[in-house]
């Protein structure tokens, strides 16, 4: 399940909804990772652009990996502006086994940072400034070098 939202995420609502939806599906584990925008380097927050067709393809490939391990991946991400101390990213792994979920959440978050087509901007005094020093280029794209 991939969910995209305008601006900040309601981490409590999303996490509770996922728990309520899947608690009776016989998974033994739901591990979540919640990303919160930090107040650093004088920014007021972050802003995000997403290329949805590539994100959907990337996410579908992770769902296939998870299915092979009897697991499932959940993800929610912000589009647009997210102020400091607010949530921009939540992911979760459902699995019957904790070791599968622990390993998969780590691999998923690291791959997300390296390969998901999401571009990050710093919000500074009302302007979006591309965060080049904290961005990674997408393989085979010729973009963001």
Image (tube, rainbow, N blue to C red):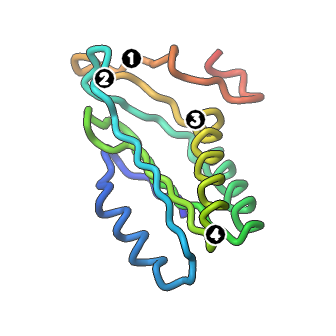
Q: CA distance from mark 1 to mark 4?
A: 42 Å
Q: Which residue is mark 3?
A: 113
Give the image location of residue 47, x and y in percent: 37, 31
The residue sitting at the left extreme is 125
Is 73 left or right of 17, judged from the image as shown?
Answer: right
The residue sitting at the front extreme is 99
Q: Residues within 10 Å of mark 2 (few under 14, many from 20)?
A: many
Q: Are marks 1 and 3 in contact (CB under 8 Å)?
A: no
Is 124 left or right of 59, judged from the image as shown?
Answer: left
Q: Residues within 10 Å of mark 3 (few under 14, many from 20)?
A: few
Q: Earlier in the sequence, mark 1 or mark 3?
A: 3
7 or 12: nearer the viewer: 12
Q: Nearer the viewer, mark 1 or mark 3?
A: 3
Q: Earlier in the sequence, mark 3 or mark 2?
A: 3
Q: Which residue is mark 1?
A: 129
Give the image location of residue 117, x and y in percent: 59, 37
Q: CA distance from mark 4 to mark 3?
A: 25 Å
Q: CA distance from mark 4 to mark 2?
A: 40 Å
Q: Are marks 2 and 1 in contact (CB under 8 Å)?
A: yes
Q: Circle 3 sits in a helix, a strand or a loop, which is it? A: helix
Q: Which numbered disc covers residue 53?
A: none
Q: Which residue is mark 4?
A: 97
Q: Residue at x 61, y 69 (%)?
A: 95
Q: Residues within 10 Å of mark 4 (few under 14, many from 20)?
A: some
Q: Which residue is mark 2?
A: 123
């Amino acid at each position: 399940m991939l969910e995209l939202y305008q601006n900040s995420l309601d981490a409590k609502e999303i996490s509770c909804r996922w728990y309520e939806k899947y608690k009776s599906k016989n998974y033994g584990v739901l591990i979540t990772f919640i990303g919160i925008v930090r107040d650093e380097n004088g920014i007021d927050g972050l802003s995000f652009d997403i290329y949805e067709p590539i994100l959907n393809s990337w996410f579908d490939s992770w769902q296939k990996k998870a299915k092979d391990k009897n697991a499932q991946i959940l993800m929610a991400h912000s589009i647009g502006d997210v102020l400091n101390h607010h949530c921009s990213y939540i992911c979760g792994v459902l699995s019957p086994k904790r070791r599968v979920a622990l390993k998969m959440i780590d691999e998923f978050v690291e791959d997300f940072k390296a390969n998901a087509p999401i571009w990050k901007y710093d919000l500074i005094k009302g302007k979006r400034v591309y965060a080049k020093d904290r961005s990674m280029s997408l393989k085979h794209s010729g973009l963001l070098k």
